[in-house]
Image: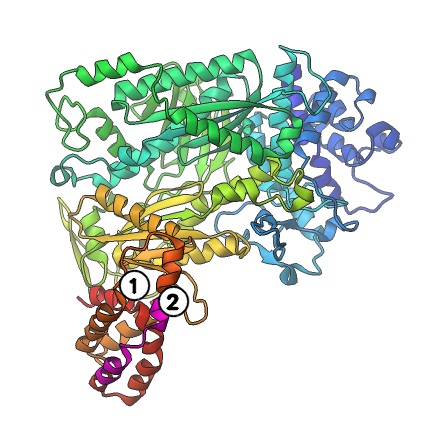
Amino acid sequence: MDDYTNLKFASLFHDIGKFYQRADNLGKSNHAYDSKYEKLDASDYGSSGAHSKWSADFVKDYFDDMVEDLVLYHHNPSKSSFPDLCKILKKADEHSSKERIDADEKGDVLATPLTSVFSRISLSDEDHDEYYVPLVELDFTKGLHPQDKKTMSGWNLVPEYQQLWAKFVNEFKILSNINIESVLAILKKYSSTVPSAAYYSESDISLYDHLKTTLAIANCRYLFSKEDNLKQTDDQPVYRIINGDISGIQNFIYRVQTPEDAQSGMSKRLRGRSLYLTLLCEAIASKIINDLDLDSSNILFCGGGRFTIIAPDTAGTNEIIKKIDLEVNQTFIDKFNAELFLNIVSTPACGDDLANFDKVLANLALLLNENKKHKFINHLEDIFESDSRAVYDLCPVCGNESKGDLCDDCHEHEKLGGAVANAKYLIKYISQDKITDALYFDSLNIGYIFKKSKKDVIDLVNENADVNFTVYRLNDADFLDFVGEIDNENVSFDFKVLGNSIPNIHGKPLYFNHLAEISKGANKLGVLKMDVDNLGLIFSQGFKHLNDGEGGASISRISSLSFYLDLFFSGRINQIVDKFSFTTGLVDDVESAMVELDFEDKKEIVYKPRSEIPKGTGTSTIHINYSGGDDLLVVGPYDDIIEFAQEFRSRFKKWTANNKDINISAGISIVSPKFPIGKAAVMADDELEKSKDCGRDKITVFGETLNWESNGLEKGFDEIFDFAKYLEEKNESKEISRGFTHSLLNIWKNNFTKNNNISNETEWNRDIQKRLSTKSYIPLFKYKLRLIHNREIRDEIDKNGIKFMPWIKTPVSWVSLRLR
């Protein structure tokens, strides 16, 4: 291997000895590492470098002697046979770990699990309760929710370390072709919950995040050294941080020219458009790192149409940024009539800047806003030419030029949306030519293919031995089952989380009108948008209380925060949607009578169970249009969508360590199945904005903006929704008449709707106080209670009705739809 490759592997494994050392429970006088390291002391491996002996012992069996040398002496380069490379690694290690915060006392690493990065966030300078991440391998179905200190107290982590290390070593040995991307994936699987430092430091950065960012920084320092004089200082601008943002996404996804002509295949097409943008964003980021001779560790974040990359600050980097900018935006003009725009900016950074990465990101945000004012500044002639070109045939779906019924793009998006349903593998390839009829970005020379079977993957990869592939296992970390069956040496293995729930029957995706029919009562669709509150503020201010504001928002900590947020939105969402399902087989406890769905070739009978059914026996009713990064948009039966919003928020709070400064807002639109889905999504976005404008940490549904949780006399959505279900139950059993229920809404309209133009938090709070102080409705409310004949229920409504009357519109609206 060449020097650069050896440095890469040394960077990835320089601290693997910490993992190995914690699993080595053979006693102080009988260590597992090779006896040749026994005579070494701090004068050899440097201060705080004892773990290097374990690191060196691991790598010596798999890599060149240079890698062993570099990891052994990365704290003391003067002892290395390759001092220049070792200095690069030493500085990369330091710049990656600038976030380390001195602990109040010496920690017991074998009793100290990883502190959840979410419990370190504070927007009020107050420390929050610490939560810990269990020491387990990465699993997308269980085991990763943070646990509180009481639950984790008294832990002895030796058995967990030994078990985890054994699994890591066994899986590493399976690799027949040891390459950077596959190794990164194995480390992600087994070291994402291992604390990087826990001896004299707070343990909130995982070993994986530290190793990954160390590799990214070492890549930059090595390439910089080839073009410029690399100094061993922290103030030299060695790095260039690149931010990319694709704008115009919402219009692109939801633009529908003639809704009636576009209904067939619309669910697949919208999912395909969203997925197209996700993969396009990833392809642009991949193109940049490929052209710069970097690897995926240099992509710090990629999702939601945005990416952040750390690169060397060289002339070559600037040239490639300009080239990508020109080529991609030219494609957007030619292919999408300038509807999409790649906004790409960059800024230099030194080692000290990586310790305060929040400031770098804030500067990049300003540059993006400024650059957005000059969209297509280098393409004005092309835009004018595009606008003046005569177009005679238009696609009935998107309105772009078309040679047939549907344009090529809409065909491609529909095909992509169908391919992702039930796919188990995603294959990325780099080639000058398209190798299949699946998605391929010509200007980037990168393509993506979804496959459902292992055999299909093996055949495709083996038939194209000269093509570089990355094979991703979707939503499953057991990703090395191909080793030994693939002959192609140009292949890497990895795993990826992807929200890919698309309601279907026997592989046939359901149309949106089918989802509406599955809902109980009214045939209505629900469209939900959710978004993390104050995320920019969390990144820029959330860690300032740590370490006196210095090094709190380090590159490793920001990377860890991004990783765990995306893991929830892209991965855990699949387990949440499984709670909402229907089945083609009759179950014991159905919520409503059978529903007959009309397909083009046949009719299908389905049942909606009242409670959860065994995994694998039902199909989700929730259509994930997009979920990743920090937001989502899903479509489904209106009732399931409302309950899904509540469930997602509840799980999100647990995932984020119940931190009161990390919240999420939601907006729901409820429409008929023939209503243009693009407009429904815009309406949901408008409802989400109401939640944001009124103070965040809220949900807007049925035109009402509510806190999620109650606060004293002010009732929150969770309690209000419980009362809605109580009202529904009593209406359905006829213990309460619908006339009485609707009379509550009339009372509400006459007493609580005088101020409908609430546009900010101050007005919202004022409205809450007005609702609470309003008592004029009480005499009529008491009078209406006579319509309830059952005294026990009448007393219950008398007691709770008064509490909920200021917000009764939501329960009555729910009952009205469910019992229609």
Q: On screen, 742 above or below 73?
A: below
Seen as rendered, the residue at the extreme left is 392
Tag 2 secondary structure: helix
> Could you say which is closer to the camera, residue 454 or residue 205?
205
Residue 438, percent from left and from top: 31, 26
Residue 302, percent from left and from top: 46, 33
Q: Quadrant of the C terminus?
A: bottom left
Q: On screen, 582 above or below 390?
A: below
Q: Mark 1 = which residue?
A: 609
Q: Quadrant of residue 769?
A: bottom left
Prevailing secondary structure of the magenta residues: helix
Regarding residue 28, the answer to whether it shows in the image is: yes
Which amino acid type corresponds to the residue marked 2 in the rendered image? Gln
What span is colored magenta in the figure? 769-784
Q: Mark 2 = which residue?
A: 769
Regarding residue 490, the answer to whether it shows in the image is: no
Q: Residue drawn 30% across and 53% down?
A: 668
Q: On screen, 645 above or below 326?
A: below
Q: Quadrant of the N terminus?
A: top right
Q: Is residue 775 magenta?
A: yes
Which amino acid type corresponds to the residue marked 1 in the rendered image? Pro
Tag 1 secondary structure: loop
Residue 320 vs residue 271: left or right?
right
Residue 608 vs residue 456: left or right?
left
Question: According to the image, what is the colour scheme of the structure?
Answer: rainbow
Q: Residue drawn 77% across and 47% down?
A: 25
Query: Who comes first in sequence, dot 2 or dot 1?
Result: 1
Across the whole image, how many numbered discs are drawn on residues? 2
